[in-house]
Image (tube, rainbow, N blue to C red):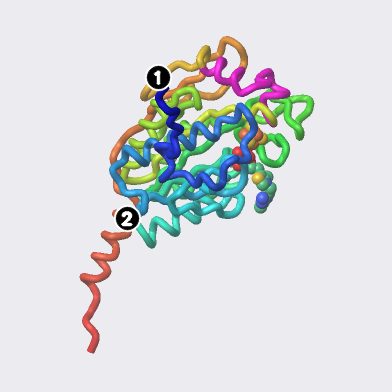
Amino acid sequence: MPKEVLATKHPDDELIRADRIPHIWCPGCGIGIVMKCYVEAIKRSGIPPERHVVVSGIGCSSRLPGYMNIDSYHTTHGRAIPFAVGMNIVKPDLEITVIAGDGDLVTIGGNHFIHAIRRNHNFNVVLVNNFTYGMTGGQYGATTPIGSKMSTAPYGMIEYSFNLPLLVASLGAPFVARWTTLHIRQLTDAILKAMKVNGFAFIEVVSPCPTQYGEDNNFPTGMDMMKYFREACVVEHEADLRKVDIDLRPGKPLIVGNFVHIEKPSYNDMDRKLIEIAMKGRKPYG
Ligand SMILES: Cc1ncc(C[n+]2csc(CCOP(=O)(O)OP(=O)(O)O)c2C)c(N)n1
Ligand code: SF4
């Protein structure tokens, strides 16, 4: 009988801090899938791991950088974007990816978010949209679909939510995509594309949170949400973004795809030009 050989090494060991496992995420949570897609994209990017940096704020999604074996920054709630902006200006050669939750990036951190897009700072943003503030108990935020039952809206959410791809595209971002945690190949490809974009590259990943969102909203397990993705998702690249609002009611499509992919100068390009002009006009000392 041949002796059983147990694997002693995982193919992703070099990019994951295995000593931090087990992770904090609940069974059925989608964040681990996002992390795996990010790891795959790093491996395929051709950019050495030492040039990749991952930045987050605070929340379940924002714990992701803690499990990555690259330079990782777990900053304060809502402030991942300003941190990435500073890093990109000082170290433009780094491949910076912000990965954080919807609460972090567009509810508490919404102002930083819109201005970073307007200025076209050069980094990638992977926004994990689980429709709630997961870590702190299922409060509603700016992405919670209308009608959802939340810990802070027990009779149903009465506010309209952001249509994120439309918002981001209207601010001029050169890359805008939406995928779900069911679309692992497309999501990996989109992250890889984002890494090649000169400027603000945005990916919304719709992701299950069975514990704080699904339980009260007809998706009690991660698998229920994944089945919903399989039934409801319609791939429509370059979709009319006025029509991609998320509506979880039965029979409504969830539009996913790579929506925008254009070229335009980034903040770094403008900054470099400005420095050249300023240096030319400068009078020598003495
Ligand atoms: C300034 C500040 N306000 C509030 C909190 C509490 N807080 C920590 S995580 C979090 C919610 C995070 O939600 P989200 O970004 O959507 O991530 P998720 O947990 O859903 O992945 C909140 C409100 C905090 N840490 N700091
Ligand atoms: S509370 Fe929700 S987002 Fe947080 S780990 Fe659990 S399932 Fe994931």
Residue sitting at 32 percent across and 49 percent down?
Answer: 48
The amino acid on which the numbered mark 1 sits, given as a three-letter code, is Glu
Q: Nearer the viewer, residue 36 or 89?
A: 36
Q: Is residue 35 above or below residue 50?
A: above
Q: Secondary structure at mark 2?
A: loop
Residue 18 numbered mark, or none: none
Q: Nearer the viewer, mark 1 or mark 2?
A: 2
Q: Is residue 251 magenta?
A: no
Left or right of 277 in this view: 114:
right
Q: Give the image quarter of residue 239.
A: top left
Residue with the most extreme front position: 1
The amino acid on which the numbered mark 2 sits, given as a three-letter code, is Asp
Q: CA separation, marks 1 and 2?
A: 33 Å
- Answer with mark 1 or mark 2, whichever residue precedes in sequence: 2
Q: Which residue is mark 2?
A: 93
> Ligand 2 lies in which image quarter?
top right
Q: Which residue is mark 1?
A: 236
What is the number of callouts on the image? 2
Residue with the most extreme top position: 251
Q: Is residue 116 above or below residue 86?
A: above
